[in-house]
Every structure is written in structure tokens, then in C-alpha cells.
Amino acid sequence: MNMTTRVYKPEISRCPVCNSKLFYRYTVSNKVIQFSSGHKARVKNLGYSCTNKECRCKDVIFTSQTASKFCLKGYTYSAKIITLITVLKKKGISREKICAKLALMGIDISDRNIDNIASKELSLLEQDYKENIKNEYKFMVDNYGQIRLSIDSLVVEGIRCVSVRDSFHNHQIGLHLFDKSDNEGVLKLLHDYVDDLNVKSITTVRKNTGFFKLLNQAVNRDMEYICFIKY
């Protein structure tokens, strides 16, 4: 059976520091990912770097935020599957029941792997995201003169999961769970991330979604939005 392969380049084509053209360096990841539909696909994330040898970003590898959204580091399951496992575990559902639920969706995963994923993701929920914001934002401004974020929102089992990452190195800054209807809570959280005027770009969900409207409301100024490409 032939497997679908999708190749992703960085969403930006020029260096955010010196505006020089980016060029291909190497493939950062090349993994078979299992999606919540049960479908498997190969996702290639290509790394590019600045052509200007004098630029301080000449050794920085820029990658696709869309591919990074599909291929979370260390996992061969899509972000939606990871989120589902996290939410169910947070609700106190046993790993055996989670495993059975995923099996009905055509997803092949062991109960031990469910425990490992849940343990890692639940620990991210407990991080001091405000301290992460302080440290990560300072690093981006010091090294790139600007802040670029990747903000994703997924809804599973009536729970919205909001994930925020640094777009330069794909570092996790914060992971948050809300009731699906808690727009006020989500809006308040987004202000913590987007009120810094050094935020120059946000890679996020498509502009026709309710979450994007909340994000745009929180930003409330001119912003470069780059929307995730739908798989």
C-alpha cells in the first residue's frame, strides 16, 4: 500500500533578522505519523538557513511550524492523539480504557506508551508558563530582535487544549486546558502571551475559526499571521 508523503518547508522564505533568502540545508525530521482518523502518513520537515554569512542567524535552522504541529518531537502520533490522551488521563480515565478507545479509532498504541505520553504532557500543564514567557521571550529578543510564536488550539472531549511554542526552536512555552465554552479564560490567557509588543508573528489556526477570532481580539494590533496548513 502506498503511503501519503507530505513535504513541508518553513512558512517564511527570508531571514527574520537580515531579510536574506533562506536556503535548504537538510531534512530535520522524516517520520510516519498516525492521525486520529487512523490514517498514517509520512511527514518531512525541511530545514532552511540564512544565506548571509555575516548574519547572526546563519547557523539557525528554520523549519515548518505546520510540520512541527503534526510531528511533535519524540512522538509518532499526531497532536490530536496526544491531546486526547492527555485530556482523558486528566479526567481520570484508566490507560486500559484509553487504549481501548484509541483501538476503536484504528490507532495502534500500547497502554505503557499511553502512560509515558500522559506523564510527559501532564507535567507540561504544571509548568510556570509565565516564567517560561519571561525567559523565552528575552532569548528571542536578544538573539533575533523579535518574538515569533506558534499557537495551536485543539478541542477534544469538550476540552480545549492551547499549546504555545517558540517558532524559532519549537520550545514549549505553555500548555493549557480549558472547558470548550470558556472563551473568557482563553482570552485572558492569550493576553499573557501576545501583549508584548516584540511579538511580530504568530503561526496559528485558520482565520475562519472561532479560536482565531479570540486570538485576533487578544492581539488587537497589526500582526503577521501565518496559518497552519490543514493536512
Image: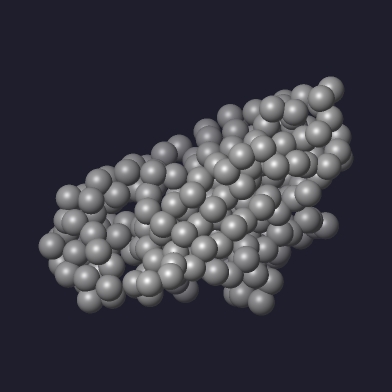
Q: How is the image coloured?
A: one colour
Above or below 124: residue 139: above
Across and down, in percent, residue 134 comes to 60, 33
The answer to whether residue 107 is visible is yes
Q: In which quarter of the view is residue 25 placed?
A: top right
Viewer-nearest residue: 143 or 191: 143
Q: Residue at x 73, y 45 (%)?
A: 199
Which residue is depicted at the point 83% across and 57% down? 222
How far across and down, in percent of the image, does residue 30 sit?
Answer: 49, 49
In the image, residue 2 sits, relative to residue 170, either above or below, namely below
Q: Does residue 196 appear to the left or right of 228 in the view shown?
A: right
Residue at point 75%, 28% (across, down): 58
In this view, the residue in front, 123 or 61, is 61
Q: x, y percentage for residue 153?
A: 52, 63
State the residue lying farthest toward the front: 1
Q: Name the quarter where the C terminus is drawn.
A: bottom right
Instruction: Quadrant for residue 187, please give it.
Output: bottom right
91 vs 159, left or right, is left
Number of marks in the rendered image: 0
